[in-house]
Image (cartoon, rainbow, N blue to C red):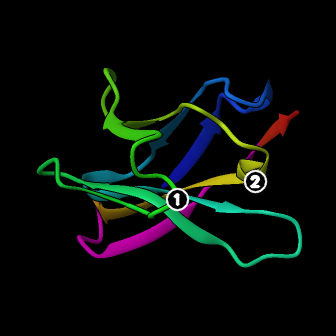
Amino acid sequence: VQVVESGGGLVQTGGSLRLSCSAAGSIFIINMMAWYCQASEKWRELVARIYAVGTTNYADSAKGRFSISWGNANNTVDLQLNSLKREDTAVYYCNADVRDLHTQSYVEVWGQGTLVTVSS
């Protein structure tokens, strides 16, 4: 199982971006997908997560500005970033909790990350 992110880039302060993450491989069911961010010289931290049933959680810094949702395509998740600030500059990583089709065990997978740069 692997996940691939897309949608990062350069945006001005106050602008918006939409990140997407697609999971592929030996997937029986996806329990949860999430977005994390890691700024330079900082720990990776949760931005938002969404469960299969639709429940969502957000970091305090993301509440009211970011929105996570299941994508239109199967096994995809989107993260809408609005009202971006310079401090949102980071590499954004997709994370998924997946039940493997063949082994029936749960595995956690991470993407390679996509860079979001917010300029003033």
Q: Mark 2: which amino acid?
A: Glu
Q: In the rendered image, which quarter contains the C terminus?
A: top right
Name the mark on residue 87: 2
Which residue is pictured at 11% across the width and 51% down the height? 53
Q: Is residue 39 above or below residue 21?
A: below
- 85 magenta-colored: no
Which residue is pictured at 62% across the width and 40% down the height? 5
Give the side of residue 92 with respect to residue 1, left or right. Answer: right
* Disc with the residue nearer the chain's start (2 vs 1): 1
Number of other residues with Cα within 10 Å of mark 2, as a class: few under 14, some 14 to 19, many 20 or more: few
Tell me, yes or no, whether the two marked residues, 2 and 1, touch with CB atoms within 8 Å: yes
Q: Please provide the residue range marked out in magenta.
A: 101-115
The location of residue 65, given as percent across then percent down, is: 47, 40
Give the side of residue 29 with respect to residue 114, left or right. Answer: left
Q: Which residue is mark 1?
A: 61
Residue 45 occupies which quadrant of the picture? bottom right
Disc 1 secondary structure class: loop
The location of residue 108, given as percent across then percent down, is: 45, 71
Give the side of residue 78 with respect to residue 50, left or right. Answer: right
